[in-house]
Amino acid sequence: MPLKSEDGRLPWWARWLTGLIVVAGLLLLVAKADLIPGLPNPFAEETHDRTGPVVLKAIQDMNRFEGASGDFQVVVDLEKDAKFLPDAVRGRRTLYVGAGSVDAYVDLGDVGPKGVEITDDRKSAVLTLPHAQLERTSLDPDRSYIVAEERGFFDRLGDFFSSHPNDEQQIQQLAAKKIQDAAKQTELAKRAETNTRAMLERLLISLGFEKVEVRFS
């Protein structure tokens, strides 16, 4: 089908399509620039949540007393490059702020009959508990974010055709590991034992015991 007629004019369908494109472009510019307040943007991106129902997989009884919790933050500087190629050509560097918490707990479920000694008059009690342990790092997604990301030419080209979810997962795992290692160097576990001892002493004294001793081994 010829685009122009013998007299040089565009056919009716071409003029109609051109007019439609011009009107759509004008509406987009007006909505983007907010020239007419209250006019909705017909091309605005909409988000639809089609997530299915949450499925309960398991229920576990908790026999732990969380005696302390630590709040941590780390800046991860992760760089990937290729040998014999400059970073501008092939390479990726990411600065990521990871914020999360580590809880310290005492597992009371491991206390056996030998871990509780009570005198006949029920005035004194000796409890022997396991040492406090650290929970796995829990990253806070609301406070963890990528600060900056530098990519080489081929990395940018690859990102255009595909995403890299493994890169984000790797940097989150690295941030969690660094926070976990830092928590081990603190007195978080010792604080949990101190608070657990105080809690049990108050509990048993309220039940009528006059002397309570809590040991950790």
Image (tube, grey):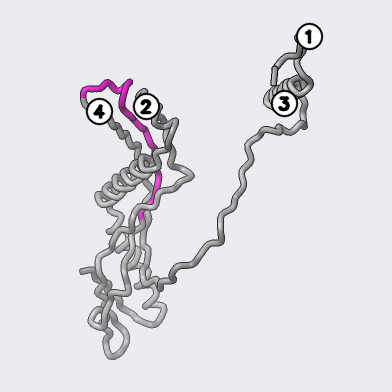
Residue at 76% across / 24% down in the picture? Answer: 13
Q: Is residue 133 visible?
A: yes
Mark toward the start of the polypeptide (3 vs 2): 3
Residue located 31% across and 34% down the image: 78
Label 2 Cα crowd, 10 Å radius (few <14 / some 14-19 / many 20+):
many
Q: Which residue is mark 1?
A: 7
139 or 107, which lies in front?
A: 139
Lower sequence index among marks 4 and 1: 1
Disc 4 target residue: 82
Marks 1 and 2, how far apart at CA: 54 Å
Of mark 1 and mark 2, the one earlier in the sequence is 1
Q: Is residue 93 magenta?
A: yes
Helix, strand or loop at label 4? It is loop
Residues marked 1 and 2 touching at CB (< 8 Å): no
At 35% from the left edge and 52% from the top edge, which residue is drawn? 137
Can see residue 34?
A: no
Q: Which residue occupies the foreground of this view, 55 or 59?
A: 55
**Label ID, residue 24:** 3
Q: Which circle's residue, 2 or 4, is located before the other in the chain?
A: 4
Identify the image quadrant of residue 90.
top left
Q: Secondary structure at mark 2?
A: strand
Q: Amino acid at mark 4?
A: Ala
Q: Separation of disc 3 and disc 2 at Cα?
A: 35 Å
Residues in magenta, as a range: 84-102
Q: Earlier in the sequence, mark 4 or mark 3?
A: 3
Residue 151's mark?
2
Q: Residues within 10 Å of mark 3 (few under 14, many from 20)?
A: some
Q: Which mark is residue 21?
A: none
